[in-house]
Amino acid sequence: MIIIMNAPTEEQMNRILNKLMVNNLEAKTIAIQDKIMITASGGTEARHTELYSRMPGVERVVAVSTPFKLVSREFCADNTLVHVGSATFGDKYIPVIAGPCAVESYEQVRQTAVAVKGAGAVMLRGGAFKPRTSPYSFQGLEYDGLEILSAVGRETGMPVITELTDPRLLDSVDQHVDMIQIGARNMQNYPLLKEVARSKKPILLKRGPASTIEEWLMAAEYIMSGGNNQIVLCERGIRTFETYTRNTFDVSAVALARHLTHLPVIADPSHGTGNWRLVTPVAKAAVAAGADGLIIEVHPCPEEAMSDGPQSLNPVNFAQLMKETSEVAKAVGRKLGDLI
Amino acid sequence: MIIIMNAPTEEQMNRILNKLMVNNLEAKTIAIQDKIMITASGGTEARHTELYSRMPGVERVVAVSTPFKLVSREFCADNTLVHVGSATFGDKYIPVIAGPCAVESYEQVRQTAVAVKGAGAVMLRGGAFKPRTSPYSFQGLEYDGLEILSAVGRETGMPVITELTDPRLLDSVDQHVDMIQIGARNMQNYPLLKEVARSKKPILLKRGPASTIEEWLMAAEYIMSGGNNQIVLCERGIRTFETYTRNTFDVSAVALARHLTHLPVIADPSHGTGNWRLVTPVAKAAVAAGADGLIIEVHPCPEEAMSDGPQSLNPVNFAQLMKETSEVAKAVGRKLGDLI
Amino acid sequence: MIIIMNAPTEEQMNRILNKLMVNNLEAKTIAIQDKIMITASGGTEARHTELYSRMPGVERVVAVSTPFKLVSREFCADNTLVHVGSATFGDKYIPVIAGPCAVESYEQVRQTAVAVKGAGAVMLRGGAFKPRTSPYSFQGLEYDGLEILSAVGRETGMPVITELTDPRLLDSVDQHVDMIQIGARNMQNYPLLKEVARSKKPILLKRGPASTIEEWLMAAEYIMSGGNNQIVLCERGIRTFETYTRNTFDVSAVALARHLTHLPVIADPSHGTGNWRLVTPVAKAAVAAGADGLIIEVHPCPEEAMSDGPQSLNPVNFAQLMKETSEVAKAVGRKLGDLI
Amino acid sequence: MIIIMNAPTEEQMNRILNKLMVNNLEAKTIAIQDKIMITASGGTEARHTELYSRMPGVERVVAVSTPFKLVSREFCADNTLVHVGSATFGDKYIPVIAGPCAVESYEQVRQTAVAVKGAGAVMLRGGAFKPRTSPYSFQGLEYDGLEILSAVGRETGMPVITELTDPRLLDSVDQHVDMIQIGARNMQNYPLLKEVARSKKPILLKRGPASTIEEWLMAAEYIMSGGNNQIVLCERGIRTFETYTRNTFDVSAVALARHLTHLPVIADPSHGTGNWRLVTPVAKAAVAAGADGLIIEVHPCPEEAMSDGPQSLNPVNFAQLMKETSEVAKAVGRKLGDLI
């Protein structure tokens, strides 16, 4: 149950909170935009909706049957639109984010940015702080990487996104990028989720490789209940027994998440498959299933990439992906990137 | 390595087989159509291709690097076309198979058949012998089910398919249907695979819920090396930790299997998701990823179905699926069903 | 709910069956030993137990809350003892079954049998019809394998077990062995389960690599409701994302299955790990968790085995396993094999 | 390859590092205790070992074939002993850590501590900062929780352990506890791993629910290559398709990790099963398989616990666990806790 209050007095607030305590319901108060919302969980009943909606200061009470409250479709039937520069997620246009796995040099990022923009991408990605399985693998250019990404973004007029892996780096990352990514391995890093909830920037929240759809939406709930409702979800494949692919891209999750939440849901076929040959077919599949965007790894020369080479497209393959996926987008009544 | 021989003499055959034994290679001789093929596995080397291709009676030697030989793209670069009545799998037209999970009555099957045909389906499915988790669940109408399915197929002019679960039933099933299905739980039932290899009917081979793509292709290799090369593969979802869906539909597997084998690959979004709401988006995703066909559960009244009700579409939903998926098919340069 | 009737008249039977139909309950009648049991599923209620227990001819009614009925602990609180020759499963003594993965020759089986018997094994295993992933791999010695196994069993005084993969082979297998194994890949091969239910021989039912504990018990229910209650369950590892081991041995499943069912539960650490180094520690773990028996692959010379070499123990390792596991058995108040 | 140098001169160091660069090997320099170690990865060859071992300042060169270097058995054949207060992990005595999932109050922790100490536990656990799936669930008493845990530890003479979830909290946690836990969901939180590597306290590193054994050891490599070699690994179950248990406890992983690494490996049967009934059998299994310790959730009144009640033992069950597991420990030549 979510109780929405419109500029309540202190006394009105207290009456509600006391009543919730008496009813043994766990309450959390959240200020989102101009409203005050109170989420109540732990045994709400049908009669509660009626009961609380009559109390003074209450604008509306929404019954929510799922453990995730604010991010649920029950709470908000309309799609949330998330704007990043000129790109909008959740709308008829399907933005495509592209760029290298890791920022390796100014030249590499610049070259990639020009190529992907030419092919219709509207946002630029690039990793500065890389979470790597081995401590001996390239860990990213770190602060220099942020500077490069930010500079290339400005020069090419593309909003940029990078991954945040450490709550202590929020301010540095925040001031260099237009959107902050929470990576798959950090989906349940709650201190990090609470930290990005404080940011005014939109958040891209990847699904963890072994996380259920419910856990993924609960992670989004952490961010939204922390005060940031500019969240885009990203399906990027789950861990299964199959070994031919790096992960198993869960295309149903795209359709299902769009049914369960009002937040936009995009797809990452690069990590979702781990194999450049499969990136285009899976990108098309994701758009056919309703994805609100794509994020694609592109490298000027994948065979020399310092990370994730096998799953990166070269610029020629990426242009082909855009062309083919654009047709599928039209078939589902949408348009890809800025290819109008 | 596959050695293809054209009407070899007995002496030529023996020389080849002896040489393989000397080279410590495991040989299997298969007559497919007019040719004799010898698959050799267990440590073939590059030089072998050259060496054997010069021997008398040998038409051609194909090096195959994967454990599956006859079903590999390396052996046969062109798509195999599988014809069932007027439907062709592997071609520009994408056949749609539809019908109830289980044959419950003549009326139910007839009603479904008319509806799905009207919406563009070209083949009729229906289970007569049902593999059920519980011995106390409805096990199918068995022989009566075969009769009903076969009768409705004749009356509506649709080829029919049903699942074979027992090698002892091959003859009964064979004479009633146009295509024989090997279900997911029987994908590694080798006596059954060897038995259907003897049939002249095309086989639909579903991927096991916990089988890798390689194991799936090895199961097809059982059938093809047994003499039946009319095989259609079907991705139907794999078992993962996710519980919102019955299975996780592996859309990459569709694209990957088409890359690895010359056999057609179709999709079953009904079992792949277990949730009727997800059937249409996943059908569209599968076609976008390159599926050569679809198999969809349709029931005149899903809420009363004796099995798999939650994942069955009603005729109205099915017609909508056909309409939407047809657009996606066009976007990838193909056509769905007989909707031209 | 299970209704147990003691020599009921036909009229008594009919009254029960009619009443079940009126109550919309699915009934199945089973003759086990001297009793007639009727399982009723699909919406039984608390009041039914009372109601049916008062009807004439009814000895007792047992409410069972799980989907598996006859195999549940609720139906039968005491451990079922399964006797095979002098071995008893489900009792204080823990029988160990050992032998080669596949019967390769009389000499190989004989040599293994003598060695494992010397170390305390009480039953001999050996595969005659081998289910193999590849059609090009060794498929077993088939009928000759049965003869060899049976002969060595007689000569060494050990009961023997082999896997049945095809319902058409039941009679051949039945007359050569003392216990019939249903392999992991056939756990949901229902025609095969129904067939072995007709045998008078005890059945070893392996858990499928991707089967839940509930599905495993439902498979046992097929056999028991078909009239054979001499069933031993065998945990042999499940398929997960981990690649260091062939399967993930689910030690909790051993403890949990013993809690849920009255049937004995044994462990197969050879398939459960796929790695000979892990066989002994996992055997000890299984016994510590309550396993009622072990089945172990032993080969006189594992590096030359025609199948499953990497997971087979040589006789020296096996003797060590017996010695170490025997200590663990004592620690949990039991005794291993015939090492008294 | 690991190059171990004994008090090298700057010139000696530079010669080595230059040579590694010329050989295209990635080098990382680590000071552990009195030595300088250089790990070299990315294509080392057999001849390198010989070559580098002859260079001045080099004490020894160890070839390591696995991607994890410092934590591998190849690097260090002897068990590493990790001391926490009077407890030692990796030795003949098997320490048992016990305590509540979450610190709820002084009284609750005190009561639990006295009970578990009486039954033979030698360390006290308790969560102060709780990572919870839902933002609406109890998040722990935080700083107050640390104070309570620390106070009870002092009063009862038990070393204490709690989970660190945020790198910014290291100092606070470090000064209150004797051992720091990295939880399963943070196993690949690399900034956190790098941070605890700076601590002088021993680290308990839980395996991630979807992490392979190799990834787990790579996570330990982050800590050890960061300068802290006081690491204890903890298997706590992995995520699979099985739903009867919360996780699938991977007992093979205990045996395998002890084979692959010199670090101690303990077991958490509470999270590993999620079901109090299974905790004792799985604890016994883990010890039988070679576990170097146990960590068990105990609550004075599990049905009222604020988190993880279903998997917590009450003091009576815990005493029984200690008694039964102690017998198994003796059977494998070890002793449990301080029960001598």
Image (spheres, coloured by chain):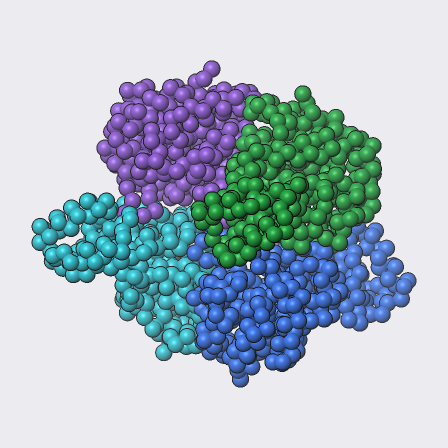
Chain colours: A blue, B cyan, C purple, D green
Residue placed most toward the observer, B233 or A106 = A106
Determine whether B255 is above or below C271 in the image.
below
Q: Indicate the position of residue B64 as horizontal and vertical percent values.
A: 29, 57
Residue D285 visible within the image: no
Q: Indicate the position of residue D25 as horizontal and vertical percent values.
A: 51, 55
Q: Which residue appears at 61% of the width and 27% of the height?
A: D92
Identify the residue at the far right of this view.
A11
Determine whether D240 is above or below A323 in the image.
above
Q: Which residue appears at 52% of the width and 40% of the height?
A: D74
Residue B261 lies in quadrant: bottom left
Q: Which residue appears at 57% of the width and 41% of the height?
A: D59
Residue C127 lies in quadrant: top left
Determine whether C76 is above or below B189 in the image.
above
Determine whether A215 is above or below D206 in the image.
below
Q: Which residue appears at 72% of the width and 64% of the height?
A: A170
Residue placed most toward the observer, C99 or D334 = D334
Q: Indicate the position of residue C333 as horizontal and vertical percent values.
A: 55, 20
Q: How many marks?
A: 0
